[in-house]
């Protein structure tokens, strides 16, 4: 009997007392064409979205309301999108062109620097240089304000799809289908470091915010995190069931997100390599992810047609590290019981509000404990 009451109570809590739905979706927007790329403006006000049909949309980052739409901004699907640190130019990658727009949606120019489909781009911290890849062994270092190729970067033995600037802009990382990660000196344009170990094509790279770690994700369904100083592989992260397409460090460097063709987004603890949570409310491959600057939320785009804004809710950490204590407090308090026989609707609704408030207090208590003494 006690077991059945517990199950009933937990089902009630799961269905009615979450501030978000069970997967913590804060907001979502459905597009007529699947979104394929996403970025956050430097001032945090806009979410820049590129669609499969070549449309460029600028959304309010809080409400997801459409602020600007440029139809046929790209000649085909937009595979990557970036905004300059000075917020004067939006760059989209579509087919073999990098196309530039101002923030009013006016076309500035197009760069014909690639012969094949462009896969990814990144801009350095000052906004002076861009790196871009195509389905080719070579990637390009571009002088943005001169509008010309500074240097074609050649060292890999196979197609190079992944590139990233370090936070200070002094180092460039590149990842290739040759299963290698190279680090380049951005000034000399020479390879300074090499990282090995992946067993298949590399799709994305990310530096930690302090520039001390480099992470790579692969067709082999894994994510690897290395410490750059001594080349030590800190974590070989497994858990996805298909290609890992995108990775992103949190602003504080404590967490890593991974997005996969298996439809899942996973949150990982960088220090331990443990999975903290799996966001599963997607119905197709997740093609891009971006942390919002607060570090407590992120956005994703998915081939099911949705852009979603997700919470990294404190309850995630409570459920991970204090599940028994949390469950005991919820089950032990009659305020969390389902509506009782004979209980009036207004009485139940009042209790429901009190239960929500009490639940948040319990979560807060254990989350503070987590922050003060993070379990090893």
Image (cartoon, rainbow, N blue to C red):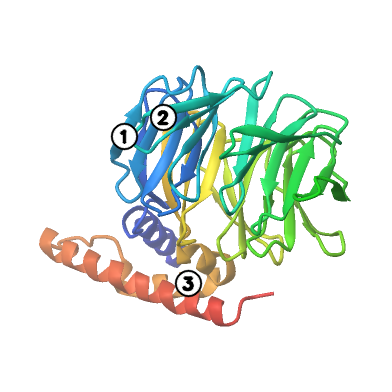
Residue identifier under label 3? 326
- Nearest the camera: 200 or 266? 200
Are there few (<14), some (14-19), or many (20+) residues within 10 Å of tag 1?
some
Are there few (<14), some (14-19), or many (20+) residues within 10 Å of tag 3?
some
For marks 3 and 2, give the CA distance.
Answer: 44 Å
For marks 3 and 1, give the CA distance.
Answer: 44 Å
Number of labelled discs? 3
Does residue 222 appear anywhere in the picture? no
Q: Counting residues from the N terminus, which is met first, the one under dot 1 or under dot 2?
A: 2
- Nearest the camera: 125 or 197? 125
Residue identifier under label 2? 56
Q: Residue at x 48, y 72 (%)?
A: 326
Query: Can you tell which of label 3 and label 2 is closer to the viewer?
Result: 2
- For residue 108, side relative to residue 179 (left or right): left
Asked if labels 2 and 3 touch by Cβ distance under 8 angstroms, the answer is no
Does residue 274 appear anywhere in the picture? yes
Residue 32: image location, x then y, percent: 37, 23
Vertical comparison of 375 with 245: above or below:
below
Residue identifier under label 1? 68
- Nearest the camera: 36 or 275? 36
- For residue 236, side relative to residue 330 (left or right): right
Query: Can you tell which of label 3 and label 1 is closer to the viewer?
Result: 1
Residue 334: image location, x then y, percent: 31, 73
Mark 2 residue element: strand
Q: Counting residues from the N terminus, which is met first, the one under dot 3 or under dot 1?
A: 1
């Amino acid at each position: 009997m006690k077991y059945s009451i517990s199950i009933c109570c937990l089902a009630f809590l799961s269905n009615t007392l979450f501030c978000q739905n069970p997967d913590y979706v804060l907001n979502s927007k459905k597009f007529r064409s699947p979104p394929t790329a996403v970025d956050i403006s430097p001032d945090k006000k806009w979410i820049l979205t590129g669609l499969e049909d070549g449309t460029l949309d600028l959304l309010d980052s809080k409400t997801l309301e459409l602020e600007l739409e440029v139809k046929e901004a790209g000649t085909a699907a937009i595979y990557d999108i970036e905004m300059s640190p000075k917020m004067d130019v939006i760059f989209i990658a579509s087919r073999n062109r990098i196309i530039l727009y101002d923030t009013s949606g006016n076309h500035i120019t197009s760069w014909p620097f690639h012969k094949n489909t462009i896969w990814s781009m990144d801009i350095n911290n000052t906004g002076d240089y861009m790196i871009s890849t195509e389905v080719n062994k070579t990637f390009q270092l571009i002088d943005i304000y001169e509008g010309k190729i500074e240097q074609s970067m050649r060292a890999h033995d196979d197609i190079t799809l992944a590139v990233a600037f370090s936070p200070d802009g002094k180092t460039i990382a590149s990842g290739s289908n040759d299963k290698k990660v190279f680090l380049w000196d951005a000034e000399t344009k020479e390879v300074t470091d090499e990282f090995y170990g992946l067993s298949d094509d590399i799709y994305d790279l990310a530096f930690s915010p302090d520039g001390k770690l480099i992470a790579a994700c692969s067709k082999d369904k894994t994510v690897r995190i290395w410490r750059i100083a001594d080349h030590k592989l800190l974590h070989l992260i497994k858990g996805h069931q298909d290609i890992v397409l995108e990775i992103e460090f949190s602003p504080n460097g404590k967490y890593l997100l991974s997005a996969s063709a298996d439809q899942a987004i996973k949150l990982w603890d960088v220090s331990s390599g443990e999975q903290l949570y799996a966001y599963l409310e997607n119905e197709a491959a997740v093609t891009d992810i971006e942390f919002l600057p607060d570090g407590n939320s992120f956005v994703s785009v998915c081939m099911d047609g949705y852009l979603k804004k997700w919470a990294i809710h404190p309850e995630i950490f409570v459920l991970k590290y204090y599940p028994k204590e949390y469950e005991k407090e919820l089950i032990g308090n009659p305020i969390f019981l389902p509506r009782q026989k004979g209980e009036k609707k207004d009485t139940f609704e009042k209790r429901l509000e009190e239960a929500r408030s009490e639940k948040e207090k319990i979560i807060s208590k254990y989350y503070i404990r987590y922050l003060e003494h993070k379990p090893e």
